[in-house]
Image (cartoon, rainbow, N blue to C red):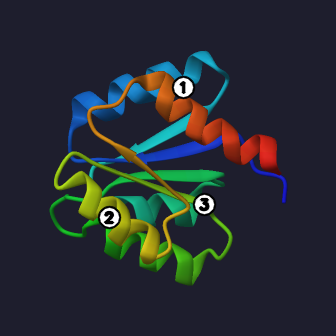
Amino acid sequence: MSLVRTVLIVDDSQDLTEVAAEFLRIFDYTVYTASNGIEALERLKTSQVGIVVSDIHMPDMDGLTLMSEIKSRYPGLPVVLITGFSVSEARKIALNKGADAFVAKPFRMKELKDVIESFYSAS
């Protein structure tokens, strides 16, 4: 599978999404952002996305529910979940429920980029 170098970052922290988006754009990614799962699903209807990076804890629709919807509607679209809450338990739950990768907050932007890059090098 050839992935489009486009990332959708979903997090209710506008500061995090803006910083991550600007960092990834330096490496020639097209980056979209959404503040919750509902916005993310709307974006996926209108934009070709190669990877979704989503926080787990968000209002309106959490990241686990979003991931389930993505896996149902867009099979094969990688989802990377991130959180800073109960990290070891969240990692286990996220991966058991089908996340393609997990990144604990706080993280270095390079760590996030390396996880995203691993999907492109594998394709």
The residue under label 2 is: 63
Q: Is residue 22 left or right of residue 51?
A: left
In the rendered structure, find residue 78 and report the number of the disc placed on it.
3
Callout 2 crowding tier (Cα within 10 Å): few <14, some 14–19, many ≥20: many
| Mark 2 vs mark 3, CA separation in Å | 13 Å
- At 45% from the left and 29% from the top, the residue drawn is 21
For label 1, the SS is helix
Q: Is residue 122 left or right of residue 81?
A: right
- Residue type indicated by callout 3: Pro
| Mark 1 vs mark 2, CA separation in Å | 21 Å
The residue under label 1 is: 24
Q: Position of residue 60 (x, y in %)?
A: 18, 68
Please determine whether, in this image, residue 19 is positioned above or below residue 34.
above
For label 2, the SS is helix
Quarter occupied by residue 96: bottom left
Please determine whether, in this image, residue 37 is positioned above or below residue 35.
below
- At 34% from the left and 34% from the top, the residue drawn is 17
- Residue type indicated by callout 1: Leu
Q: Earlier in the sequence, mark 2 or mark 3?
A: 2
Quarter occupied by residue 33: top left
Q: Earlier in the sequence, mark 1 or mark 3?
A: 1
How many numbered marks, from 0 up?
Answer: 3
In the rendered structure, find residue 9 and report the number of the disc placed on it.
none
Q: Is residue 91 left or right of residue 44?
A: left
- Residue type indicated by callout 2: Gly
Residue 36 visible to an observer of this rendering: no
Question: Looking at the figure, which quarter contains the N terminus?
Answer: bottom right
- At 29% from the left and 47% from the top, the residue drawn is 11
Q: CB atoms at circles 1 and 2 under 8 Å apart? A: no
For label 3, the SS is loop
Quarter occupied by residue 68: bottom left
